[in-house]
Image (tube, rainbow, N blue to C red):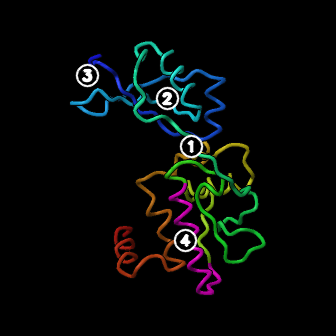
Amino acid sequence: EDESAVLTIVLGICCEWFCACSLRWKFANLMLCLGYSTNVIYPNGISNGFPIDIQRKVVDSIPGLEGARILEPAYSIEYDFVQPSQLHNTLQLQGIEGLFLAGQINGTTGYEEAAAQGVLAGANAALSSMGDAKFLQINRQEGYTGVMVDDLQKGITEPYRMFTSRAEYRLSLRGDNADERLSPIAQSIGMLSTQQWTRFTERRV
């Protein structure tokens, strides 16, 4: 058999919730070539955590992928999480002073969600360790981080993603006014240097 004629595919990761959904609904598959000089593709849309024999059957059932060789089988990630209704809006766990949580442990999925929580929880953990009475808090009107935290505090039944459609103030939560919305908040808790704050105030004049 000519190896160069065999299509090779790399499958991706998924969370258990997505795997369950993939059994109920049909998803479009986008074939992404991984380079000009390779026959390896990534079939975006069939991430799963099924056993390898099932994955082979799934791939063989897709027109054009019959007989394709799986270079890297897909796998799922399972993790425990804290019900985020147990969090303060500073991301401190209720009942345990000084313990701040961020990322998947709060029931979210996605890099951006984890990064935003990391900034919030990290800043507040630092403030807490210094004995500061002020904390970084962002509400729904001030930023998408505030929307996410407020949504999480209401409790979740599936992994949480931050979509713009969740924000009732999305027309005013724009990238071109982020400094106007968030710089005063950052300044109030000492997250901006004197130079950064001066530069911000000069732009406002």
Q: Earlier in the sequence, mark 4 or mark 2?
A: 2
Residue picked out by circle 1: 163
Q: Earlier in the sequence, mark 1 or mark 4?
A: 4
Badge 4 density bin: few <14, some 14–19, many ≥20, Cα 10 Å: some
Label 1 with label 4: CB-CB less than 8 Å: no
- Which residue is at 64% across, 30% downward? 21
Please state which of the two labelled residues, at mark 3 or mark 2, is closer to the viewer: 3
Q: Earlier in the sequence, mark 3 or mark 4?
A: 3
**On screen, residue 24 above or below 188:** above
Name the side, left or right, on which 196 lies relative to 90.
Answer: left
Q: Quadrant of residue 194?
A: bottom left
Badge 2 density bin: few <14, some 14–19, many ≥20, Cα 10 Å: some
Badge 3 element: helix
Give percent across and percent down for residue 55.
53, 26
Please state which of the two labelled residues, at mark 3 or mark 1, is closer to the viewer: 3
Badge 4 element: helix
- Residue 4 badge: 3
Residue picked out by circle 2: 45
Residue picked out by circle 4: 122
Name the residue nearer the viewer: 14 or 87.
14
**The magenta segment:** 114-134
CA–CA distance in space, label 3 to label 2: 25 Å
